[in-house]
Every structure is written in structure tokens, then in C-alpha cells.
Image (cartoon, rainbow, N blue to C red):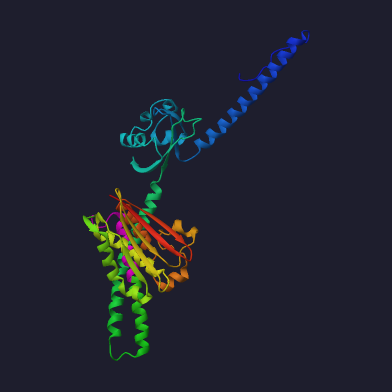
Amino acid sequence: SGEYVPIKTDMSEPELFSVLNQINELNANIHNHIRVADCERVKLNTVLDNVSQSIIALDYTNRIVFANKSAFSMFGGTHRDIGRDLIFLIENIEIYENITRHLNEDYVFTCAYNDMTLSVVISKVTDDAISHEISAIIIVTDITQEKLIQKQKSDFFANASHELKTPITVMQGFAEVLMNKESMDETSKKQLGHIYKESLRLGSLISDMLMLSKIESGDAPKSVLSEIALEELAKEVLDGLSEKVQSRNITVTIEGAAKLAADQTMIFELIENLVSNAIKYNKDGGFVTIFIEETEHNVILKVKDTGIGIEKEHLPRLCERFYRVDKSHSKRIGGTGLGLAIVKHICAISNAELSIESDFGIGTTVTVVFSK
């Protein structure tokens, strides 16, 4: 029945009575610990069974030690699969092989399964106390809805950008024509100049929106790999930004050289965005240094400035669309708020790692590490 029943004692034999009492007390304590442990196990299983994510624990032979209700529901398994190889629960060979290939590391991937898009997180168990029983924990999340919402947002982003491009171009053209009219008085010319300047800024924003939406949706022109001399490409970028550099009296230097096999248009866009930001958020008379270095396995590009810097709490969000650290400052100096978002996506396409370090009031260093 699972209930604890103490051993009957006989007081007529004091020594035996004392021993049996101690045994009863010990048994009562053990029973109480078992009851508490069972209660905690039931609580934990109840919580895990009501979690929407699928949770699976494997031993070092890829056998299932634990799986919650969501895992059985998602993959069509039953409790009979406990103790069997993972393939009996996850019958999709591609997903099974991707999981088992990475069980000795922390790893994340997304995949299609039936009509769902799944995010799979593999965590290697490093606790020696349980690693001989559980070697890895797998958490599978259905992100189909999130992907759909993301696609809808991207489609709206792309369509809005495309529809706005033509009227903005027309506004620019008419403003330019009117400014060149000799009969136009100075006040009107000044107002038209302001319209023209703002239409250029809006045109730049729309171009960046179109670029970002194409990269995100995979509609950007197919990458054409070629050998790029990074220092030469950086010089081309500086030629296009020379007016901004001179107007702020900023000194820009290029140090080092390296060749990289990549898409030249994308890498040009990446360098242009990084250098443009370094100029834009710099102090008048400041410095921008472009470091280029080649190692055995990597090509490293760093853009360092002596600008206003960024407070630490803002760093994780810098690559979000339209994220502004200081809205008033950003409005004053211009910019689209999409530069680093574009850089992040180009890095992902180019198999490169992006990192940003900054000291508020001192300057910022953006590092891109390309894998050869």
C-alpha cells in the first residue's frame, strides 16, 4: 500500500525494545524522505508536462531518460519510448542526425517539421553528479507563429519601402527644379532647400529599408564571391564620404591590409555603414581608424572612433531596426537607424562575427571577424 507500518515492540525485553524503537524511528525518517521526494517529483513532472516546449533528456547512449507531455504530443510518441533510442520518438532522420551530431556541445538550430518551424536547443550536461545518467537536454519550441508574424512584418516593410520610393524621387526632382529657377526669391529657395534636404534623408531611409528587407527575405542579388583587397575597398568608401569627413574636420586612417573572398557589394556596404557611423557620431576634429588584419584562420576589420561613445546598457540593442540611443542627437545629425541592422545581416550572410565595444564619452570600436 506504500504506507509505513512500524515494527511491533515488546516492553518485556528492554534491550530489544530500545533497538526496535530506533529501527522504527529510522524507518519513519526514511519513509518521510521518500514521501517528500515523491511529492517533489510529482510537482516537477506536473510543471514540465504543462510547459509548451518539448523537453527531452538523453543519456550518453542517446536513450531517452525523460520526455514531457509536449514532446510526446509534438512527435507522436508515448511513455513506452522512455528507455529507447531517440529515433523512436523523433523519427525524422534529418532532425535526429542534427541533434545526435551535436550532443557533446551547446547548440541551437531551426528546422522544418511537418507544417511547423521548430527551434531546437541542445544543452550538454556538465554536472558530474548526474552526467552519467543524463548527458544532454533538448528543448524544442514551435516558432511557426513567430516566423509568420516576422514574415508579415518583413513583407509590410518591403512593400511600404517600395511604394514610397517613387513619390519621394518625384519630390526630390521637383524641389531641385524649383530651386534652380532664377525668379525664386531667397526665402522660397531656403524653404525648398529644406524640403530637398529632408527628401534626400527620406530617400536614404527608404533605400536602406529596401536593402534590409531584401537581405532578410533572401531576395537580395545572389552573392558573387571575388577576392577583395579590404584596404582598397576602404579607400573607395572614404572617397565617397570625403565631404562628410572634411565638414567635421575628422582624420581617417587605414592601418594594415588583407585579402578576403566575399561579395564586394555587400562588404562595401558594411564598411560604408561602419565608417559613416564613426564619422557621424564623432566629435569635430576627432579620429577614425580602420584596422585591417589577417591571421591564419581569420580576416579582422575594426573601425575605431573617438566619438561620443555608447552607454553599456544600450550595446545589446544597437543592431535593432531604428533603435536610437539618443533620439534628439540622432535627429540632429541624421541617419536612418538601419545601418547596424544591415551590417548584422551582412555579417550573417558572410559567415562573420560582429562585436561592439564602447566607452561613453571616449569612443566606440566595431569589430568584424571574417572566417577564411
Residue 72 position in % (x across, y down): 43, 33
Left or right relative to 308: residue 217: left
**Of the pair 9 and 54, the residue shown nearer to us:** 9
Asked whether residue 115 is in view, the answer is: no
Left or right relative to 242: residue 50: right
Spot the residue most to the top.
Answer: 12
Asked if residue 39 is positioned above or below residue 359 in the image, the reply reads above
| Residue plotted at (59% across, 30% down) | 39
How would you classify the magenta stretch by its main secondary structure?
Answer: helix
For the N terminus, the image quarter is top right
Q: Is residue 115 magenta?
A: no
Spot the residue most to the front.
Answer: 256
Q: Which residues are magenta?
A: 203-222
| Residue plotted at (64% across, 22% down) | 30
Asked if residue 141 is positioned above or below residue 342 in the image, the reply reads above
Asked if residue 65 is positioned above or below residue 334 in the image, the reply reads above
Q: Is residue 215 magenta?
A: yes
Residue 19 position in % (x across, y down): 71, 13
**Of the pair 244 and 338, the residue shown nearer to us:** 244
Name the quadrant containing residue 244: bottom left
